[in-house]
Amino acid sequence: MTDQQKKQPASKKAEETRTRILEASLQVFRERGFERATMRDIAAEAGVALGAAYYYFESKDAIVMAFYERSQGEMKTAVEETLARSRTLETRLRGIIQVKFDCFEPNRKLLGALSAHADPEHPLSPFSRDTAAIRDQDISFFARAAEESKVKLPPNIAPYLPRLLWLYQMGLILFWVYDHSAEQRRTKILFEKTLKMLLLTLRLAEIPLLRPLHRLAGDLLKTVYGDTP
Amino acid sequence: MTDQQKKQPASKKAEETRTRILEASLQVFRERGFERATMRDIAAEAGVALGAAYYYFESKDAIVMAFYERSQGEMKTAVEETLARSRTLETRLRGIIQVKFDCFEPNRKLLGALSAHADPEHPLSPFSRDTAAIRDQDISFFARAAEESKVKLPPNIAPYLPRLLWLYQMGLILFWVYDHSAEQRRTKILFEKTLKMLLLTLRLAEIPLLRPLHRLAGDLLKTVYGDTP
DNA sequence: GCAGAGAATTGAACATGTTCAACACGAGAA
DNA sequence: TTCTCGTGTTGAACATGTTCAATTCTCTGC
């Protein structure tokens, strides 16, 4: 799907070293948090020289990206299963987002490094070009979740639904990352309430009475996202 | 209002130097952007030694905060005028937000340093403790804008309106900062459309038919913001 | 086994935010 | 005038992300 690393097959040993550095990074990140973790710490933990870390990863940020990509790969199959197992939009949304929470749980704090940047020009921003491939795949999950659902949105809004659902998910994850309540209970409540509200809103959106709102919303989305491709 | 700098009256010369450094910073920020601007550049531009910059500002971020605080001070009176001049929620919102755009225009790019962080633990995040004073004052503007308006929201939602309007404003500003269209036209369109949509939604919210939505929304807001103080 | 090319690895060096001990200077006391 | 004290100022030094020339390792063709 996405273009493979431009690197050659990469010898077995090299792949091993790369993995070791990545694992060491996650270990150090979990211990000290992203900011406080030093590239020297990471190299030491992996048992390599500082330069080796940079031979395998372009930057400290790139390590987080590698983690993100690997996670996305792992989540893909889990999401496929969820989509196959459920039919309604509600169960599918619940399923997809739950997969994210479950998969990111062990590195929840580290995820802050990924969601901390609203700046779409920052490589680690969820809106950046660098994260576009992952984002697009993610959005396609939501497209498939919406596909067979009975939701009938006005045609000038429907095309944006997957992107809006993705945005909703990102908001939830952002809240989750910085949710200090025990076991992130507040996020769970937020999830339940907003999901219900979302579905209720989607059903309300079918009422023709709201035509003026539909028109406004459609124009607005066109402004933000550009014409639907 | 806010606690004055803990520093003493500060000699005239000191105040002058501080201002000189702040102005030099803005100059360099405008030229090179926040990231690429070096503290050494700034010190050189201001004609002082590197250490002097740190004598007056705790950090590079703190310079942006100083700019933010100064801007907020300047905008305060402009917002007061707007509030005094207009009566409806629409004109007031339009007025307040326009003041922001006008005031920040010369340093629009620099504002990226302030809005780039979604992380509420980052000092420069609009959600951080460090920006709380400014945020609260800002929210109070919206409280006053809503005060005399004819909007009648359900009592479990009404207390959150000012904070929601502030959030809306922050979203607009974020979009504006990274809006690459000529003269930021897209932001203008977005502003118009979303404002109309917002007002329409507020009017719709008065329909008792939507009781279930009101309950959900109220619970949700309570989860996010805590009980209304 | 051996030469050489390319991959992997190393650590010193650099850039930049930040800290800090030392110094300069000006106003009041003696 | 000279001494003293505190504000203001300086630049060297440090921490850490990053670069890179040099070195070592590994495999391939002979």
Image (spheres, coloured by chain):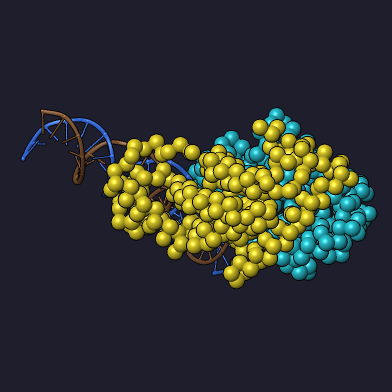
Chain colours: A yellow, B cyan, C blue, D brown
Q: Is residue B210 above or below residue B20?
A: below
**How many numbered marks appear?**
0
| C21 sits to left or right of B107 | left
Percent x, y of residue D3:
48, 64
Looking at the image, which residue is at 59% across and 52% down?
A83
Looking at the image, which residue is at 48% across and 52% down?
A74
Which of A187/B7 is in front?
A187
Q: Is residue B151 visible?
A: yes
Q: Quadrant of the C terminus of chain A?
A: top right
Which of A133/B26 is in front?
A133
Which of A114/B70 is in front?
A114
| Residue B58, image quadrant | bottom right
Looking at the image, which residue is at 36% across and 52% down?
A19
Percent x, y of residue A139:
61, 44
Percent x, y of residue B62:
60, 53
Work out which residue is located at the far bottom of the displayed protein and give it.
Answer: A182
Looking at the image, which residue is at 77% across and 43% down?
A153
| A131 sits to left or right of B83 | left
Q: Is residue A225 above or below residue B75?
A: above
Percent x, y of residue D6:
56, 63
| Residue A58, image quadrant | top left
Q: Is residue B58 visible?
A: no
